Amino acid sequence: MSSEAAGSARREFGEGPLARAAALVYTLLAIELLFLLAVLPGLIPLILLARDGSNVPLAAACAIPLGPALSAALFALQHHHADLTDLKPAAAFWRGYRLNVGGVLRLWIPWLAWMTVVGVSLAHRGASGVPGWWMAVLVVLAMVSTLWMANALLITSLFAFRTRDVTRLAAYFLGRTRGVTLGVLCLSIVAVGITLISSEAVLALLGSVFAAALLHTARPLTAAVTEEFTA
């Protein structure tokens, strides 16, 4: 077989529908394993914690590794190749982790601190004597901050902006790409539901799937950032 024919056969093997599906499944499985490895230091103690309001700060501390791991998964999925013969999900995952860990933690840790304040306030609402309307405000603020954090995580993972620019862009796109905001809200509700019904371990086992769903949902946001702020 000539080299040209061999190259054609290789392209056909690596680029067909079945090969693309196999490449996606392999990539998701590989990223899931790496994601679990990255969050394991926090996941194990988190699973062992009792679901009690007094453990909210400890749960937040256990969630610190989740931010960089999710960022690395988003980066690897963004750089996924459909060609079965050109798959390097592990290299992309760790490259994304190294590139983004600092930027992600500068946003992720303050967000976790804020969510800790909200969680402790809600868990001890009876003892604190805070009125119900203020609790409702806290829940709304927590939801908005979570949506903002999702935008910030996406932008930090896929683009090279300063932290202060990421904070502004994440807030700007909450209203600019409302479909993305609604989609992320739905994903957040599903994630919370899975955690409440089962456990954090089950949610972690779906980490790469949730990352892929988040990346797909946020396509209008990433396209707008690319077109308007990176040209």
Image (tube, rainbow, N blue to C red):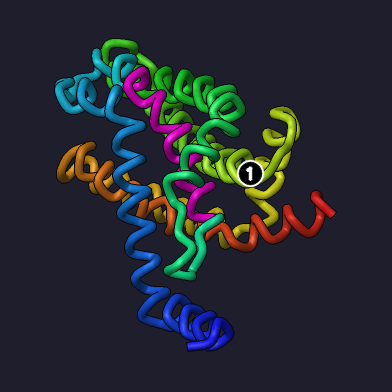
In the image: residue 169, left or right of residue 144: right
In the image, farthest residue toward the front: 1
In the image: residue 8, left or right of residue 229: left
- Splitting the image into 4 quarters, where does residue 21 fall? bottom left
Along the line of sight, the residue nearer the viewer: 22 or 169 = 22
In the image: residue 92, left or right of residue 55: right
Q: Position of residue 105 (x, y in %)?
A: 53, 24
Along the line of sight, the residue nearer the viewer: 15 or 117 = 15
When the figure is inspected, residue 176 is found, relative to residue 130, above or below; the finding is below
Amino acid type of disc 1?
A: Ile
In the image: residue 13, left or right of residue 36: right
The residue sitting at 41% across, 55% down in the picture is: 186
Along the line of sight, the residue nearer the viewer: 133 or 150 = 150
Q: Position of residue 176 (x, y in %)?
A: 70, 55
Q: Position of residue 53 (x, y in %)?
A: 24, 18
Residue 67 lies in the magenta-colored region = yes
When the figure is inspected, residue 56 is found, relative to residue 144, above or below; the finding is above
Q: Which residue is mark 1?
A: 155
Residue 40 lies in the magenta-colored region = no
In the image, farthest residue toward the right: 231
When the figure is inspected, residue 82 is found, relative to residue 201, above or below; the finding is below
The residue sitting at 54% across, 80% down in the picture is: 7
The residue sitting at 39% across, 67% down in the picture is: 23
- Splitting the image into 4 quarters, where does residue 49 fall? top left
Quarter of the picture containing the C terminus is: bottom right
Q: Position of residue 167 (x, y in %)?
A: 68, 33
Along the line of sight, the residue nearer the viewer: 121 or 218 = 218
When the figure is inspected, residue 17 is found, relative to residue 117, above or below; the finding is below
Stretch of the chain drawn in magenta: 60-78
Secondary-structure class at tag 1 = helix
Local crowd size for mark 1, using a 10 Å CA cut-off: few (<14), some (14–19), many (≥20):
many
